[in-house]
Amino acid sequence: MPTAVVLDSQFNVAATYPSSEFKFQEASGFKDNRFVADLNLTPAAGQDYLYLLVYTTQQDVAKTTMVPPPAKVYAKATGKQPPAINDIEVKHSLNGEVIVNATTSNGTKFIGLPTTVFSSNKASKQVGTVQSVVNSQAVNTAVDKDTETYFNQAVTKALKAKDINKAMNLVNEAERLGLKSPRQTFLKQVSLK
């Protein structure tokens, strides 16, 4: 679970975004489950750089997040009634992936920075979207054999139906739970073709 701090060009704290600012987004398309926050920042006049520091705290690592199982996500994506399956409790981890997308914009929104007007010879700069993806090794709890069997069968069924995307999503979800055999099942089935 990330926390973000924006530093000005002198490395002074300009803005802080606690973990509560990052909202959970379910997997969709090719994007896994993730925490997302949009930061719309513009440097002050004469400021050449903004720095973004992303970290986690011990309090956030001790928490968990409820993640919908792949069957629910797939049902929602295909417009079907989601099955009555409980969500999976995922423990937070010190490990993770951070994706930062920066885009320029004509808007000027000063967050935590001096609100002086840009000089006419300076172009505006914006630092944008910050995404932290739930880590694929974030879960360290034991998963029962039935769950592993479910994933293996679901991967095989998806591949037989020639639905590679569904199979890969199932493999990714299984790996987040700490399961290794669904990937092996996937590779074995693909190599047979």
Image: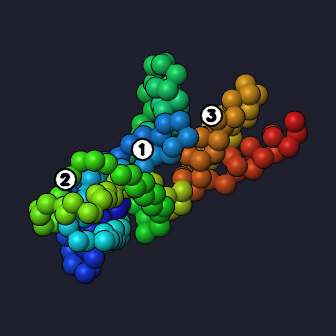
How busy is the neighbourhood of tag 1: few (under 14 within 10 Å), some, or many (20 plus)? Answer: some
Residue named by callout 3? 166
Instruction: Please state which of the two labelled residues, at mark 1 or mark 3, is closer to the viewer.
Output: 3
Residue 168 coordinates in the image, percent (x, y):
65, 41
Residue 85 coordinates in the image, percent (x, y):
45, 32
Q: For this view, does 172 lie left or right of residue 152?
A: left
Residue named by callout 2? 109
| Residue type for callout 2 | Lys
| Residue type for callout 1 | Val
Circle 3 SS class: helix
Circle 1 SS class: strand
Residue drawn at x 81%, y 40% is 190
Residue drawn at x 87%, y 36% is 193
Residue 165 found in image quarter:
top right
Question: Closest to the observer: 93 or 14?
Answer: 14
How busy is the neighbourhood of tag 2: few (under 14 within 10 Å), some, or many (20 plus)? Answer: some
Is residue 157 something that shows in the picture?
A: no
Residue 47 found in image quarter:
bottom left
Residue named by callout 1? 67
